Image (tube, rainbow, N blue to C red):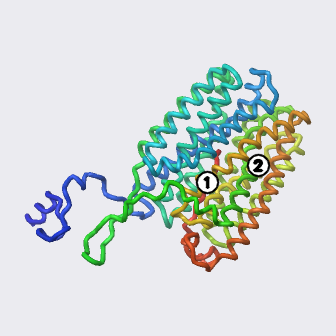
Amino acid sequence: MWLKELKKLFGVRGEWGAPGRSTPLHSETKPPAPACTDGGYGWVIAATCFVVTGLTSSVVRSFGLFFIEVQEHFDEQASNISWISAIAVAVFHLTSPVASALSVLLSHRAVIMLGGLFAMLGMLGGSFGLSLVWMYLTTGVILGLGISFSWIPAQSMVNQYFNQRRAMANAIVSSGECVFSFVFIPFFQWLINSMAWKGAMVVIAGLQLNLCVCGALMRPYRPPAKNTPSSGVKRQDSEEKPPLMDFSLLKLPKFLSIIVFALFSVVGFHIPAIYLVPFAQGIGVEKLSATFLVSYWSVADLVGRLGCGWLVNLALVRNIRLLAMMTTVLGTSLMLLPIATSYPSLAAFSCFCGVSFGAAVSLLLTVLIDVVGVSRLDSALGMLMFFRSVGCLLGPPLAGTLVDMTGNYGSGFYAAGGALITSVGFLLLTDFLMTSSEGQPGPELERGPPDSQRKGVEQCSVCVKAAPPP
């Protein structure tokens, strides 16, 4: 007994005197490596990422509340005001590879905390409202950078801690966008009514600092120790860091096809958040009632995400085909939304679009993992978000131009729906390429058997938002 205690005191493993079996005491000062047992501290990570997703995505969704206020303040056309949100979302996607690389080079914890500082500075700087160009720089570039540095590492952390329960964990994480939007959107509108849009942005800037607290809770994941067959001694898995960016993914036709799908679909994902409230006010809906349409959308969004997470685990249909169906439904619904001329019909359309939107968004990373595998998720996600920035940058201004030409905010929904319907074609092409390559050896097949063979087993899938939100 006393011999074991002495060995533990001096950090010695195995028998004394055996070569290569002693470990200095200082090397044991790190916390024990958490095993990927789909629980334990992983639930702390999931809860923290829930808050990160909510704080970042709810701000992106709130752009519609500030749209008319900012437009009246600067007396500018809708297309010019649309550039503020377009730049923010574009920078969020454009800098995603940088966020992924810094997470590998530094740590997920450090990058998330840095993102919280940028997000706070972006909202605080925008509250001064010095000029429209100033808004582009602060609420556009700096805020977008903060959202990217916070959101990208958080999504990666969840996938490191969870395996069999990954679908459940990511459904919880992605629901943060819906829950926070449901609570924050009316709260933000109350702030605007009480202290004008500039004062509201100051309060939101303070809320963004909570991202730094979330980052501090992100304990780095290390693979569990394994017994080596040669010596029977527990050793850590190789701690060599993966490459900062795996550009070999660009050689996969199926990955290139999913990139084009993402480029078109992101246009349809973000335009409704900008123009739903202005469209409702344009047909005579009172301001606060129009704001609640976003809350209805958020509740329906949550139902769509959780319901789709449950449906994915049943493995009744391939993930990518389910995504194609949900994207088609969403695109069609958005093109029909402008026919609504009363508040009840607008509320009904908001709920229906919210369900299909939540289902579609929750499947994006699931399908991405089906294409490239979990081990290459960081690189794939970074590059995917980078190319999506083109759609983020051009989509809202294009919709704004249509609104200026027609004088009707409903034109923006036609643009969103058309982009989504177009994106489905590339999604079907990706499905064809994936089906053709199944059974062939390659790193992209590390995900295991096809979806059709997973009945009865809980999938290792991911149900998270894109975007922001955003």
Direction right: furthest residue = 406
Residue drawn at the location 55% of the way across and 59% of the way down: 246
Taking 235 as reference, is 347 above or below it? above
Residue drawn at the location 66% of the way across and 75% of the way down: 437
Taking 469 as reference, is 277 above or below it? above
Q: Name the residue under label 2.
A: 268
User: Residue 432, image x and y in percent?
Assistant: 73, 72
Amino acid bearing label 1: Met
Q: Quick one: SS at disc 2?
A: helix
User: Residue 208, image x and y in percent?
Assistant: 54, 34
Q: How many marks?
A: 2
Q: Badge 1 local density, few (<14 within 10 Å), some, or many (20+)?
A: many
Is residue 129 shown left or right of residue 40? Answer: right
Taking 213 as reference, is 9 above or below it? below
Figure quadrant of residue 179: top right
Taking 39 as reference, is 289 above or below it? above
Q: Badge 2 local density, few (<14 within 10 Å), some, or many (20+)?
A: many
Q: Which of marks 2 and 1 is nearer the N terminus?
A: 2
Figure quadrant of residue 181: top right
Say which of 238 and 66 sits in front.
Answer: 238
Say which of 82 and 469 sits in front.
Answer: 82
Residue drawn at the location 55% of the way across and 29% of the way down: 121
Residue drawn at the location 73% of the way across and 57% of the way down: 260
Is residue 172 shown left or right of residue 13? Answer: right
Quadrant for the N terminus in the image: bottom left
User: Residue 84, image x and y in percent?
Assistant: 70, 33
Q: Quick one: SS at disc 1?
A: helix
Amino acid bearing label 2: Gly
Figure quadrant of residue 191: top right
Quadrant for the C terminus in the image: top right
Q: Name the residue under label 1.
A: 383
User: Residue 58, image x and y in percent?
Assistant: 63, 40
